[in-house]
Image: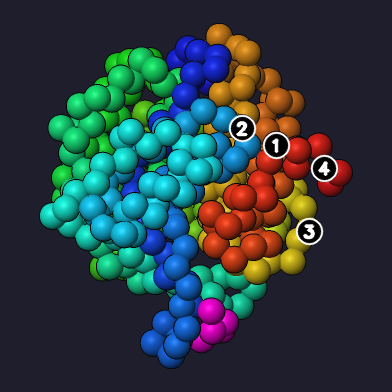
Amino acid sequence: MTIFNYIKYTMKVLCIGEALIDMICTDVNVSLKEGQHFIKKAGGAPANVAAAIAALGGKVSMAAKVGDDPFGQHLTDLLEKMGVETSLLIKDKNYFTTFAFVSLMNEGERDFYFNRGADKELTLEDLHSLQLKEYSIVHFGSATAFLPGPLQMTYQKLLTQAKQNGCVISFDPNYRHLLFQNNQAHFIESCMPFIEQCDFFKLSDEEALLITATTSVQEAALALRKKTKAIFTITLGKQGTLLCLGEHIEIIESIAIKAVDSTGAGDAFVGAVLYQLNQQALKELSLVTLSQWKNIVRNANKAGARTCEYLGAMEAFQYLSNSIFNENE
C-alpha cells in the first residue's frame, strides 16, 4: 500500500477543471433531437465536487475558466453562495461559457452534447495566484481536460506540481462517450498517469471495464490493482460501490432511493469522500483503517444516492449536509 502524503487538518481541497451550464431537457425519455423544453442548471464535474464538499461543510476552492458573460457570472455567484472559494475561477471575455445539453432517459440516465467554450482555455498563467501549500488535496475530475487545448497541459503540469508540494491527489476521469467515441485509446492513455500517480481515484463500472479491457468489475479491480498503489472505488449504481484497499476488495452497498436524475451523483460521491478525508485528524492517509474506509464509502454512497432524488446536481446539493452520514441504512 502506498505511503500517502501528509494531510494538513483544516486545510482546503482544490478542484480543477470545467465549470459549465447544463441545459437539461425536461421532456423525459426523449432524445435531445426531439426535446422541446430545457432548463438551465450550473454544472461541470469538478464544480459539482467542489459544491458537494462545501455543502457538507468543507473548505474548497474551484479553479476553472468561464466566459465573461451572464452564464459565467451565474456560475460564480452560485458557487460562492454554496460556500466555494472562487478567486481561481477566471472570467475571460474572449470565450463563451461552456454548455452541456442533457437529456434525461429511463431511471435517471442521461444523454450529453457539449458546446465547448472557455473551460478548455485555462492556463497555469491564469492560476498565478495559486499557492498549493494551502491545499491538502487536489482533485482532477474532468474528461474535457484530455481534449486538445490549454487545459490539457495545465492538468498535466499541475499534477506534477501538486505531487511535488505533497498534496494528496484525487482523480475521477468522468468519461463521456460523445467526447471520445472515436478515440477511446487516447482517453485511456491520458488516464494512466493520473491512475498511476494519484492517491485515490473513483471510476464508474463503465470506465473500469473500458480502461482495463475486461468484462467484469472484479476483473477490472484486479487489473487496476496491478497498475497503481492508490486506494480506489468503482461505483456500481444502485448496487453500491466496490472498494479496493491494498489486497482487500469489497462491495459496499448503497441505499434505496427513487431516482429522478443521476447528474452529479458520482461527483457527490467523490465530494463526500474528499470531505471526510480532509476531516481526518491524521498525519498520513495510510493511517486510515479498512473499517474507516468502509464507513467513508458507505457515507459517500448516501451522498450520491440522495443527489439522484433531485433534478440537477447543484439543486440537489442545496439539500445535502453531513447529517446524512447519520442516516440508517
Q: Main secondary structure of the magenta part?
A: loop
Alpha carbons under labels 2 and 1: distance apart: 7 Å
- Given residues 98 and 281, the one toward you in this image is 98
Distance CA(mark 1)–CA(mark 4): 10 Å
Q: How far apart are marks 3 and 2 (CA)?
A: 25 Å
The three-letter code of the residue at mark 2 reads Gly
Between discs 1 and 4, the one toward the N terminus: 1
- Of marks 3 and 2, which one's residue comes earlier in the chain? 2
| Residue range highlighted in magenta | 26-30
The type of residue carrying mark 4 is Glu
Q: Are marks 3 and 1 in contact (CB under 8 Å)?
A: no
Q: In the rendering, at what x and y percent does residue 115 appear?
A: 27, 67
Horizontal and vertical percent for residue 213? Answer: 42, 55
What kind of element bears circle 3?
loop
Residue to which mark 3 is pinned: 256
| Disc 4: which residue | 327
Query: Which of the labelled discs sits on residue 171, or is there none?
Result: none
Judge from the rendering whether residue 179 lies leftward or rightward of residue 258; answer left or right. left
Judging depth in this view, the residue of 69 and 173 nearest the camera is 69
Q: Residue furthest bottom?
A: 34
Q: Which residue is drawn at 41% across and 21% down?
A: 135
For residue 57, the mark is 2
Disc number lying in front (3 or 4): 4
Element at label 4: loop
Q: What residue type is labelled 1?
A: Asn
* Residue indicated by mark 1: 322
Q: Distance between the residues labelled 3 and 1?
A: 18 Å
Mark whose residue sits in front, 2 or 4: 2
